[in-house]
Image (cartoon, rainbow, N blue to C red):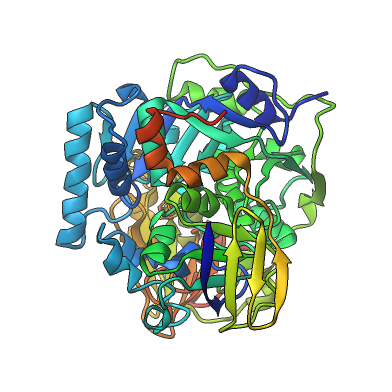
Amino acid sequence: MRLKGKAHKFGDDINTDYIISGKYKFKTLDMSELARHVMEDLDPDFYKKIRPGDFIVAGRNFGCGSSREQAPLAIKHAGISAVIAGSFARIFYRNAINTGLPVIECDTSAIEPGDELEVDLEAGVLGNHTRNTEIRITPLPPVMLKILNDGGLVAHFRKYGGFHLD
Amino acid sequence: MGQTIIEKILSRKSGRKVQAGDIVVAKVDFVMGQDGTSPLAINAFREMGGRALFNPSRVALVIDHSAPSPTESVSNLHKLMRDFARETGCRLYDVGDGVCHQLMLESGVVGPGFLVIGADSHTCTYGALNAFATGVGSTDLAAAMISGQMWFKVPPTLKFVCHGELPPGVYSKDLILHLIGRVTADGATYMAVEFTGEAIRALSMEGRFTIANMAVEMGAKAGLMEADEKTMGWLARYTRREFAPAAPDPDAVYERVVEIDAAALEPQVARPHRVDNVVPLSEVGGLPVDEAVLGTCTNGRLEDLATAAAILRGRRVAPSVRFIVAPASRRVYLEALRDGTLETLVQAGAAVVTPGCGPCVGTHNGVPADGERVISTANRNFKGRMGNRNAEIYLASPASVAAAAVTGEITDPREFLK
Ligand code: SF4
């Protein structure tokens, strides 16, 4: 999987309430509606700034807080191709893979807002075209790669009728 | 090599001896979803081709986050859950029954050695009953509803040894806030934690639930405790089932051990907008508050309401404060009605709302105004958590919340216990 886009940068400990506020997530299952409110409490205009394929880049512990799957779904439906962060909170990490949103763990300190990035998931490298640098990314555990390659857990279950991870 | 609590439970549930780092597919004993997560799970269940639940008596859906419904769109999602429960035969807890976690504890479906998943991050609460209980998202919930299984990476364990006993006026909430402040919001990411030591053993089960509840606020997958006579005595009130507790081996391997002296602790608060922004309450004493909230899955049990009532008895809530009380469940509500706790709170000026999540998550029941400050017994103080990004939330114990409700400012509750 190769992904290309611009970096939108956020800090450490971005919680799921910031990604999509509780006051919206309970209201609807319409993900394109939720997508309009993504990151709204941190940047009210964020949704308008996204071009399809762009990346969210953050520091440590991205996605901490609640178990809401609306968080990765809202990000995905807003047109973001992957989240790149120093580390992820575990429920968000699982939910992202289950819903088919790639999550990439690496040192993000040298990525600046607006940098043009390209990610090669199989090769495990992130190229920063603006700065002409390459960053190694932590490979996904094989179980997660399998689910992601199947297109998420729903597709995995459709294919095998249950867990088939060996 | 010895095993931690979580390694033992995951070994039993996967049928082979495992250790941290292994990937397992394990059998789950119980599966729970709430109204913020179940509608998506129901969709995923259908998309996965699910027709029946793996076992309807081991699945429960709870309507608690926006209950009763504040809008028509929420009402429609609630209806979707009710229809699904009727169709599949799973248990449905409806408006007024209480917060999902309290209901799981009270219904006797969780016990020592069990593996439970819930589509809510505070599912870790049941770790106080020596169960491996963890939060997942909606798609995982759907997968478990169909298969009765879930995959896990066996996590390493961080152990807290809490020496001494908490002094009067200092509660389990103060202890867990202090521990989160100490290891930070991602100090236990991808790990399980075990809470042990004299201070934990001395706590009531209610007090232990508060601690396990907040394990996720340090990033943990589970917050586990050993089962003792108190655990078994508490369970006996709710179920006649037999359980097989999982005790850690003496030579279990821990990722890290953190020791603290609970006897030296004073009341704590988490300041906005992070749960790990913890300081002794004395550092922020005197800050005016506009709203005080008592309730939630962290601190909405009878013991919590009674602690607050002891401070509010014969006193009035300050005119500048709205004091909102949400009992954690219908059962708690009834018990507090019968023993006079609620009468004391209401007489003092409390507004009691439906058992459930109430104001905790910003859906309704007490959204603060711009620039307002809230003191709450909840577990999260993120910006916007209560529905207004321009408000501040301080987290504290039920006693500290009651003290602030009386004086209108953040106040050391020990002043009322003299
Ligand atoms: S009371 Fe608050 S933290 Fe607990 S389950 Fe409800 S919304 Fe979540």
Residue B256 is situated, as x and y percent measured from the top left of the image, at 81, 45
Quarter of the image with the C terminus of chain B is bottom right
Residue A55, x across and y down, in percent: 52, 71
Counting from the top left corner in percent of width and height, residue B281 is at 65, 70
Position in image of residue A129 (x %, y %): 63, 79
Q: Residue at x 68, y 28 (%)?
A: B7
Using the rendered view, name the quadrant where residue A60 is placed. bottom right
* Quarter of the figure with residue A134: bottom right
Residue at 48 percent of width and 26 percent of height: B28
- Say left or right for B386 vs B42: right
Task: Quadrant for the N terminus of chain B, please.
Answer: top right
Q: Is residue A79 above or below residue B2?
A: below
The reply, left or right, for residue B408 in relation to residue B202 is left
Instruction: Tell me: residue A75, above or below residue B188.
Output: below
Decide which of B321, B258 is in the foreground and name it. Answer: B258
- The residue sitting at 42% across, 50% down in the picture is A99
Using the image as rendered, state which of residue B54 and residue B36 is in the foreground: B54
Q: Is residue B54 above or below residue B310?
A: above
